[in-house]
Amino acid sequence: MSRVLAAVAWPYANGPRHIGHVSGFGVPSDVFSRYMRMAGHDVLMVSGTDEHGTPIQVQADAEGVTPRELVDRYNRVIVEDLRGLGLTYDLFTRTTTGNHYQVVQELFQGLHDNGYIIARTTLGARSPSTGRTLPDRYIEGTCPICGYDSARGDQCDNCGNQLDPDQLINPRSKINGETPEFVETEHFFLDLPAFAEQLNAWLDTRDGWRPNVLKFSRNLIADLQPRAITRDLEWGVPIPLDGWRDRGDKRIYVWFDAVIGYLSASIEWARRSGDPEAWRRWWQDPDAEAFYFMGKDNIVFHSVIWPSILLGYSGPKPGSLGALNLPTEVVSSEYLTMEGKKFSSSRRVVIYVRDFLERYDADALRYFIAVAGPESTDTDFTWSEFRRRNNDELVAGWGNLVNRSISMAAKNFGEIPAAGVLTSEDTALLEAVRAGFAQVGDLLGRHRQKAAISEAMRIVGEVNKYFSDQSPWKLKDDKARMGTVLHVALQAVRDCNTLLTPFLPHAAQQIHELLGGTGVHAPMPRIVDVEDLDNGITYPILTGDYTTGATWSPQDIVAGTALAAPTPVFKKLDESIVEEELARLQS
């Protein structure tokens, strides 16, 4: 058994998350974590809502509420949505906790003590009409490097280069279109160029990464610049230095405090577990592995900036927490579009997770993301393709196999029948299904989820073929052979259900029970309202007991287990849903 940290990107708490968001950070991380737990590994899956930064302040002002009121509202919405998807976080918390503030300030202080944080006077963007600082991401203009006309003030999405807002040609505010003023202000910067050699050496050891992540990361290292680590802002983590900590107009930049959330969430989890030092087993054991899940727009923060923070804090003199492990792999997905368009809440090209779950099963979305999602290339979600995948693959392929095999056994035997003498066809099927555990498991362990679920569904197809070829419904005059065929089919269904459990946990639990199983097969997260460990504020967390459930291995069914007529596991979708959903987009 090894220890595995699943560090999941932090959704921003300025609104509900849409299905494009969870296709990058949510479902892939849960599929991986469920598989690793089933395979016997000690998994710690952590994240939370990202709640600081100027965009929160700007939106709160626009809505006439405080930043705290805004993030409280959306923190709960996001927690409920992720619970609905069945994402098995050991702790899903938030960045506005006392624990998080302390850990962020500790890493800032450690980097400062080691000489990796430097003070500079720079030009900051402000709104001429309000006098308020404009966040880099709220400024657009033409990239001075590649000429892209919609580059952001912190990064050009076209060429990937880091930018400062004053470098943009014809900069403009995304809030109101006005030209920002640039005024001198003092800030602290992370000395990223100091880590270039170490980062390159580390990337040289990263075998098996997705090629797009590795290539993008190397390109970034080739032109590293110091990056601002503080902002002119009232909402955020205070700067832990004399002369700065009590200032109301300076805060630590949100990108810095958010990536530290992986560590602070691990520490919070340990504190809540009753063993405050337990987090060290995932962060300091040289044999522990850490996998970071996100969309491709966050690669820079996880393959360059976060490793730099970890390297800087760990040496030359480690801070009080001690030296910390670097990521094992940055698992980045590409973008999911919708009906050929980029997701946009303002343009109503969106479907929020909670709206989706009100109308469709969570596993239907999980299946689509796994089999057709943006694992290595941008992919498009269309309602017609979603319906086709659901009806032709989940319902007609897997659900129908489950239903007819259990129905026939229940009708003719009332229980799982005993197996008689096995034919070569029987043993060939059982061997093929059991071989799937190594094949599918290997793919899941290497983050090839699309190939993994395709292989699992191919095996389902083999079971369907066996069932049709053997035609147990024609064996009414040979009940012994009928019972053997049904026993073999149900054994294959049992094992296929295990292969599909990481992808389809809600259905897996239901199928487990249809086969006469009891207890937890696919554990689920729960929402718990807790008090902040350091300031008493109550907030919801996602957590759960994942120590029980299926293991990643074939399990023999037991002849004589009572069976009842099953209910359908998946819902067939009418053709009308395509027109209805497209009409919603246009309304």
Image: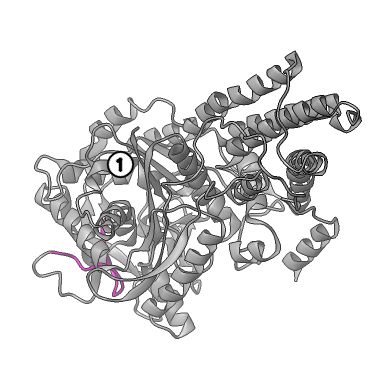
- Whole-percent x and y of residue 277? 19, 50
| Segment colored magenta | 228-240
Give the color scheme: rainbow, by chain, secondary structure or one colour: one colour
Query: The N terminus is located in which quarter?
Result: top left
Is 160 displayed left or right of 327 in the figure?
A: right
- Whole-percent x and y of residue 244? 14, 69
Secondary structure that dominates the magenta span: loop
Identified at 88% across, 28% down, the residue is: 475
Identified at 48% across, 30% down, the residue is: 211
Q: Which residue is mark 1?
A: 224
Is 37 displayed left or right of 97 in the figure?
A: right
Q: Nearer the viewer, residue 273 or 268?
A: 273
Decide: is 477 above or below 108: above
Total marks in image: 1
Residue 538 shows up from this direction: yes
Residue 47 occupies quadrant: bottom left
Residue 127 occupies quadrant: bottom left
Q: Nearer the viewer, residue 450 or 470?
A: 470
Determine the secondary structure under disc 1: loop
Circle 1 Cα neighbour tier, 10 Å, few/some/many (<14 / 14–19 / ≥20): some
The outermost residue toward the top is: 424
Query: Which amino acid, mark 1?
Result: Leu
The outermost residue toward the bottom is: 64
**238 inside magenta stretch:** yes
- Whole-percent x and y of residue 286? 24, 33
Query: The C terminus is located in which quarter?
Result: bottom right
Identified at 25% across, 42% down, the residue is: 281
Identified at 47% across, 66% down, the residue is: 172
Q: Nearer the viewer, residue 117 or 555?
A: 555
Is 256 displayed left or right of 174 in the figure?
A: left
